Amino acid sequence: MLSCREAVRLISEGMDRPLPVWKRIGLRVHVLICTLCERYRRQLLFIRNAVRRHPDKLEGQDQPAAPSLSPEARERLKQALRQQQKH
């Protein structure tokens, strides 16, 4: 029996490429038993289908660009990270 962690990994992996038969069977058995993993699978399918149906609604196409850090702020962050690495 698959663990939930392995099932989640296989659910996600199965969205990108076909799974081998033995992994698909194990995943189906797990999802039949585990309602949380089945819910996760349905949520991923919903998101994937929504994006496919409405690609024009993706962020960045009709919306202004997200604010970014100024070069000065980036440099301050870099310096603070360097200081933390020294300690």
Image (spheres, rainbow, N blue to C red):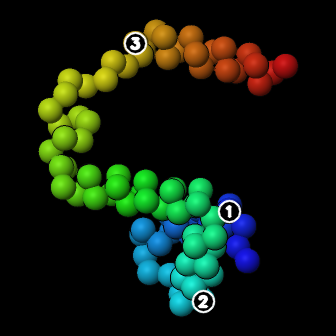
Query: Left or right: 80 with respect to 74?
Result: right
Identify the residue position indicated by label 3 in the image.
Answer: 70
Give the residue pinned by disc 2.
Answer: 22
Q: CA distance from mark 1 to mark 3?
A: 42 Å
Q: Amino acid at mark 2?
A: Trp
Q: How many marks?
A: 3
Q: Is residue 35 above or below residue 13?
A: above
Image quarter of the N terminus: bottom right
Rendered image quadrant of residue 86:
top right
Mark pair 1, 2: CA separation: 17 Å
Q: Earlier in the sequence, mark 1 or mark 3?
A: 1
N-term mark: 1 or 2: 1
Query: SS of the residue at dot 1?
Result: helix
Check the image and report above or below for 4 versus 18. above
- Given residues 67 and 1, the one toward you in this image is 1
Residue 2 in view in this figure: yes
Image disc number at residue 61: none
Image quarter of residue 68: top left
Going by the numbered disc 1, the residue's amino acid type is Cys
**Circle 1 sits on which residue?**
4
Comparing labels 2 and 3, the label whose residue is closer to the camera: 2
Question: Residue at left 44%, top 81%?
Answer: 18
Few, some or many residues within 10 Å of mark 3 (<14, 14–19, 20+): few
Amino acid at pointer 3: Ser
Q: Is residue 38 left or right of residue 85?
A: left
